[in-house]
Amino acid sequence: MLRRLVLALSSLSMLAAGLNGGASAQGLFGAPPPNASSGDNAPADDKSPPADDKSPPADDKSPPAVDTSPPAATQAPESKPAELPPPAPVLPGSPTAVVKPFYDHLGLELDPAQRKNFADPAKTVLDKSDALRASGQGECLDPNMALDNADYDKLAIDKSLRTIEAVNGDQAKVVVAFVVEGHQHRLEWKLKKIGGGWKISDLLSVTGEWALSQYQCE
């Protein structure tokens, strides 16, 4: 009987020691995972429901990207050239009627037959030019002075030629403007009334800055 009591006490002592050892081991390695049974080596059965992401999808309300790059340069519409008014009719015997033939025929101012339409100082310069040419020493004047030494383009001249006439007693002025190959030209014809008719006394180029009376054909 005593022996059984001693064995029972020994068993209780060993059980207590085992329990104390298990508690020390548990404090050293950390607490067991939830729902884990002591002594059970099976993996923990995670019965928690899966996370349900009920958050609505992101609503992208950001404004669309705006292209801030400068717009490509657009070609400006070609401006139409201003239409010229129709030329005024030329009155017979007017200063303009004396000047107009020099734009119908190239080099008419160098033709001796036309010398009757000139007066000094222009007439003297033209006569000296004729004498210099006849001597074989060359030319003194350009062959197209009436065109401001521009290339002769009768179609362009006929289309763009405009004249303005101003008369002051026995003196008159005819301003001639035209366009050849995109270049504007303007000349001024001075006239004198001699014997009842108009005679050309000088020819000046406003664009070329020259005058017939300034030539020295000697």
Image (cartoon, rainbow, N blue to C red):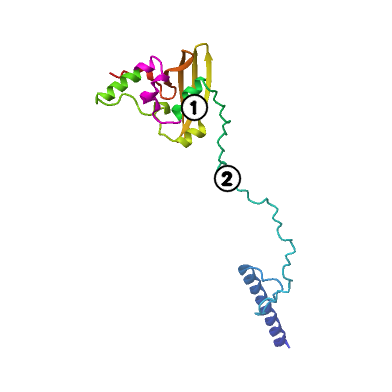
Q: Relative to residue 120, is residue 75 depicted above or below?
A: below
Amino acid type, mark 2:
Pro
In percent of width and height, residue 40 lies at: 67, 79
Of mark 2 and mark 1, the one earlier in the sequence is 2
Local SS, label 2: loop
What is the number of callouts on the image?
2
Q: Quadrant of the C terminus?
A: top left
Instruction: Give 155 or 69, whichever is nearer the viewer.
Output: 155
Query: Can you identify the residue that label 2 sits on?
Result: 71
**Residue 213 visible (yes or no):** no
- Answer with the quarter of the image where residue 19 lies: bottom right
Q: Which residue is mark 1?
A: 177
* 41 displayed left or right of 156: right
Q: Quadrant of residue 50?
A: bottom right
Does the magenta segment cover residue 16? no
- The label on residue 42 is none
Residue nearest the observer in this picture, 194 or 64: 194
Badge 1: residue crowd in 10 Å (few <14, some 14–19, many ≥20): some
Callout 1 amino acid: Ala
Rendered location of residue 93, percent (x, y): 51, 20
* Tag 2–tag 1 contact (CB < 8 Å): no
Q: Which image quadrant: the N terminus?
A: bottom right
- The magenta region covers 104-124
- Give the left or right position of residue 78, taking residue 11 as reference: left
Residue 72 visible: yes
Q: x, y (%) of residue 33?
A: 67, 71
| Left or right of residue 142, residue 95 in this image | right
Q: Compared with residue 191, is residue 82 higher up or lower down, i.e. above or below? A: below
Secondary element at image label 1: strand
